[in-house]
Image (cartoon, grey):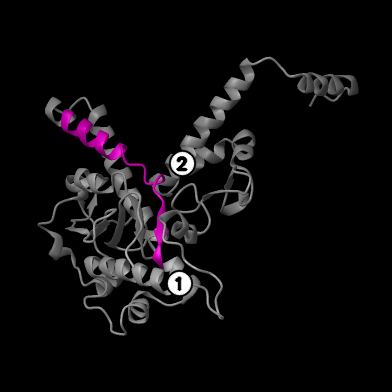
């Protein structure tokens, strides 16, 4: 079954130096872009030299990661840095929804972290007095390209979530189950995994289009419905902030888990500063900073408006009781 799309759907897969998003980097990125009304997708894969921007050196690939993906430090010496292909990657992402296998929890946060590193690097170049004018123009152009991409905006179809909901297994088993009973070649290479994920989703739509006596749930052939299998709506990709059923943002970890972010900012603003000074992902820090700006703007706006009748009555009651505080 071909996908019924209203805009492009971009399947992607990442291989990395390790699994710690704040301190690891992408070493391979593959895109399979499916267009509405077009049977054949476009495919693009980048081999990327992982870079530590703070220490200005190549980032080491964790030995356990190399055992899985078969890539070692020396294999990437002549590959471009992420910052050199970030503009091209941004163009591929433009106006597309996203799909992948377990991508909502790892690949998407990792991709977002790399973009945040590019933004930080460009801003530092623009702010530095020593940066030549030509380099500032180059940094400004790249910054504009990457800032045009908001990875929180696209719908996200995680094929693994659908798969686990229907037939709990891994990607190789999913391919055997849905696509003919044989393992696909070159598993754990980004392009092979991405193409396999694309084929699995199409086969899932064929298999689950009608209910049967064992399963009432069906799959609808539209990206919005498929993206619902991702589950909870996280504010940041690492899941430290989450939307509640009331639409408010809640802390989702640590001592304040389950509490309104707005209330924490009002009563313990130092907590937001602690986030910025600690080893959270740049995306998590950016989302906390955005919320702090929103809460401050709301407070400032409230301070400028006249008090409501209810607020005046409440203040009068406190005054009469002698308990203003």
**Towards the viewer: 8 or 266:** 8
How far is mark 2 from mark 1, CA to CA? 37 Å
Q: Residue furthest bottom?
A: 181
User: In the structure shown, which secondary structural element does the residue marked by tag 1 occupy?
Assistant: loop
Q: Secondary structure at mark 2?
A: helix
Residue drawn at x 22%, y 31% as measured from the top left: 140
Say whether residue 309 is left or right of residue 37: right
Q: Quadrant of residue 46?
A: bottom left
Reading the image, the residue beneath label 2 is 287
- Quarter that holds the N terminus: bottom left
* Residue 171 rendering spot, x and y as whole percentages: 35, 74
User: Magenta stretch: residue 117 in it?
Assistant: no
Where does the magenta region start and end?
137-159
- Give the residue at mark 1: 208
**Foreground: disc 2 or disc 1:** 1
The residue sitting at 27% across, 55% down in the picture is 37
Q: What x and y, as percent, mark residue 33?
A: 25, 56
Residue at coordinates 18% horizontally, 48% vertically from top-left? 85
């Amino acid at each position: 079954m071909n996908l019924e799309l209203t805009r492009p759907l971009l399947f992607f897969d990442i291989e990395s130096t390790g699994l710690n998003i704040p301190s690891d980097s992408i070493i391979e990125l593959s895109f399979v872009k499916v267009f509405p009304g077009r049977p054949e997708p476009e495919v693009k894969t980048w081999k990327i030299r992982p870079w530590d921007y703070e220490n200005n050196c190549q980032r080491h690939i964790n030995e356990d990661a190399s055992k899985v993906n078969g890539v070692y430090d020396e294999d990437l010496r002549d590959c471009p840095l992420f910052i050199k292909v970030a503009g091209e990657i941004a163009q591929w992402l433009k106006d597309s929804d996203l799909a992948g296998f377990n991508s909502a929890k790892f690949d998407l946060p990792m991709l977002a972290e790399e973009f945040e590193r590019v933004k930080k690097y460009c801003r530092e170049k623009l702010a530095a007095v020593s940066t030549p004018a030509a380099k500032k123009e180059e940094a400004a152009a790249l910054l504009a390209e990457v800032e045009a991409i908001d990875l929180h905006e696209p719908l996200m179809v995680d094929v693994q979530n659908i798969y686990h909901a229907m037939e709990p297994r891994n990607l190789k088993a999913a391919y055997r189950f849905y696509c003919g009973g044989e393992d696909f070649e070159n598993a754990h290479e980004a392009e092979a995994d991405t193409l396999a994920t694309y084929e699995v989703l199409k086969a899932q739509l064929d298999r689950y289009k009608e209910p049967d006596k064992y399963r009432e749930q069906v799959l609808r052939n539209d990206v919005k419905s498929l993206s619902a299998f991702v589950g909870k709506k996280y504010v940041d990709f690492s899941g430290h902030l989450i939307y509640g059923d009331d639409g408010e943002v809640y802390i989702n970890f640590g001592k304040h888990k389950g509490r309104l972010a707005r209330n924490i900012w009002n009563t313990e603003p130092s907590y937001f500063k602690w986030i910025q000074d600690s080893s959270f992902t740049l995306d998590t820090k950016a989302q906390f900073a955005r919320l702090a700006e929103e809460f401050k703007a709301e407070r400032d706006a409230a301070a400028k408006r006249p008090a409501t009748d209810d607020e005046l009555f409440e203040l009068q009651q406190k005054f009469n009781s002698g308990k203003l505080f």
